């Protein structure tokens, strides 16, 4: 309830201060070169991010093969490192639920958590499963690997035993290979599509309602609201459950000390996309920030783009105060998690209400998380 009132208050304030220039706004948005923005998004942000993700998942698959061939402490450590590198890179491509990523269920197959350990155990025991089924979304991807690399036992020696002396050791090896192979194959298919015909169709799709600008802006806002704010912070911190805390629903629960790193990576990716920053660089091109500046979007006499950038900085400040383990943070001082949630939520409102309105776009996804 506290956060519902907080949201309502922010929405009212923001509606009151958003730029509303009537016909002049429509003229300004029409004058902005959205095709140049789409070209930059495709060539400088999306394709480079997915290409990096493909490389990271390929390395993950390679390390999984080495581990399966020779399960030792060394190969386990190298596989874990490759998993974390790919998991961090995933935070940068999760924004782009477009084209082949949507068709192949990138988001659903890569990062549904908490993972379903019961189903994973049953799959391995039977050796009979179809990872393409929607009922298997929560038993694959990075969270499932988190369980298989860190959650099977309390010591590395005992974890290795699942892949060496366990009665189902062969099935454990097959399963971990199936998971890394699928992550890599989906990444390869997405990159191939973008480097094939999809890039040009993305750039040329100028339809005001269903076109690439509106679709990508929606995915960007939705990512921050539904894939970052809610699951990484709000759900485990009890925002949607009347204060009931869920220490076991944090991202990377079994590794447990990287939830903060993954959140920072996701917030950074969101901020960089807003600023139109070329992937892996500090160079900015046309993007939503420049688009807002082009239409002179303001709130209380301050440029809306500056307000949004400042709020990203505030989010990173509140996040930096969190424990590396969100499970530990929730247990010892949940108020810091709620502070981070509120900081993210405020930018969700700036983006979802003020930015979308100022740019003449429309939100096309449905709210359903009860806040």
Image (spheres, helix red, strand yellow):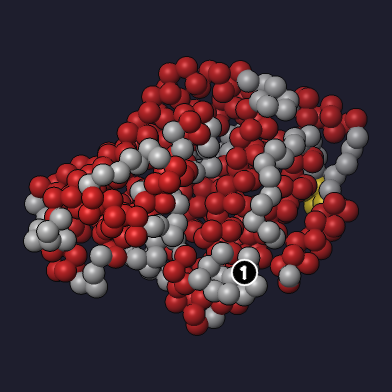
Nearer to the camera, 148 or 184? 148
Callout 1 secondary element: loop
Q: Which residue is mark 1?
A: 241
Say whether residue 64 is visible.
no
From this view, report whether residue 358 is shown above or below residue 41: below
- As rendered, which of 42 and 345 lies closer to the eye? 345
- Left or right: 120, with 211 as reference point: left
Graded by Cα atoms within 10 Å as few (under 14), some (14 to 19) or many (20 or more), the crowding at tag 1 reads: few
Give the image location of residue 135, x and y in percent: 43, 46
Q: Is residue 14 above or below residue 319?
A: above
Query: Which x, y percent locates residue 257?
Result: 38, 68
User: What residue lies at 42% left-to-right and 30% top-to-bottom?
Assistant: 190
**Quarter occupied by residue 241:** bottom right
* Quadrant in which the N terminus appears: bottom right
Q: Is residue 99 left or right of residue 115?
A: right
User: Residue at 85% of width from left, 33% of height from top?
Assistant: 25
Quarter of the figure that contains the C terminus: bottom right
Q: Is residue 6 above or below residue 243?
A: above
Is 124 or 230 nearer to us in this picture? Answer: 124
Kindly tell me whether residue 216 is visible in this rendering: yes
Q: What residue is at 45 percent from the left and 57 percent from the top? A: 113
Residue 13: x and y in percent read 84, 58
């Amino acid at each position: 309830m506290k956060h519902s009132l907080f949201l309502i208050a922010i929405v009212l304030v923001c509606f009151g201060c958003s730029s509303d220039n009537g016909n002049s706004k429509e003229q300004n948005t029409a004058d902005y070169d959205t095709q140049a923005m789409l070209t930059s998004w495709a060539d400088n942000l999306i394709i480079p991010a997915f290409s990096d993700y493909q490389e990271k998942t390929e390395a993950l698959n390679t390390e999984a093969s080495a581990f399966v061939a020779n399960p030792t402490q060394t190969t386990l450590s190298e596989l874990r490192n490759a998993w974390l590198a790919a998991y961090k890179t995933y935070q940068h491509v999760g924004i782009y639920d477009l084209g082949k990523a949507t068709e192949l269920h990138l988001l659903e197959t890569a990062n549904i958590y908490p993972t379903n350990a019961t189903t994973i155990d049953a799959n391995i025991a039977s050796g009979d499963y179809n990872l393409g089924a929607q009922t298997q979304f929560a038993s694959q991807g990075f969270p499932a690997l988190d369980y298989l690399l860190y959650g099977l036992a309390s010591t590395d020696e005992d974890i290795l035993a699942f892949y060496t002396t366990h009665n189902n050791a062969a099935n454990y090896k097959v399963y971990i290979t199936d998971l890394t192979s699928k992550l890599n194959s989906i990444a390869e298919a997405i990159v191939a599509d973008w480097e094939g015909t999809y890039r040009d169709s993305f750039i040329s799709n100028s339809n005001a309602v269903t076109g690439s600008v509106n679709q990508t802006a929606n995915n960007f806002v939705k990512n921050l609201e539904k894939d970052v704010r809610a699951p990484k912070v709000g759900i485990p911190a009890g925002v949607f459950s009347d204060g009931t805390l869920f220490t076991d629903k944090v991202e990377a629960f079994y590794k447990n000390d990287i939830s903060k790193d993954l959140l920072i990576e996701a917030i950074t990716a969101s901020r960089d996309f807003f600023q139109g920053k070329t992937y892996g660089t500090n160079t900015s091109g046309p993007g939503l920030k420049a688009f807002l500046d082009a239409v002179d979007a303001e709130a209380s006499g301050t440029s809306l783009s500056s307000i949004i950038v400042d709020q990203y900085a505030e989010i990173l400040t509140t996040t930096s105060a969190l424990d590396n383990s969100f499970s530990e943070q929730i247990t010892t001082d949940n108020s810091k998690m709620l502070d981070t949630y509120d900081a993210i939520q405020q930018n969700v409102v700036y983006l979802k209400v003020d930015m979308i309105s100022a740019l003449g776009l429309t939100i096309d996804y449905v709210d359903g998380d009860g806040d």
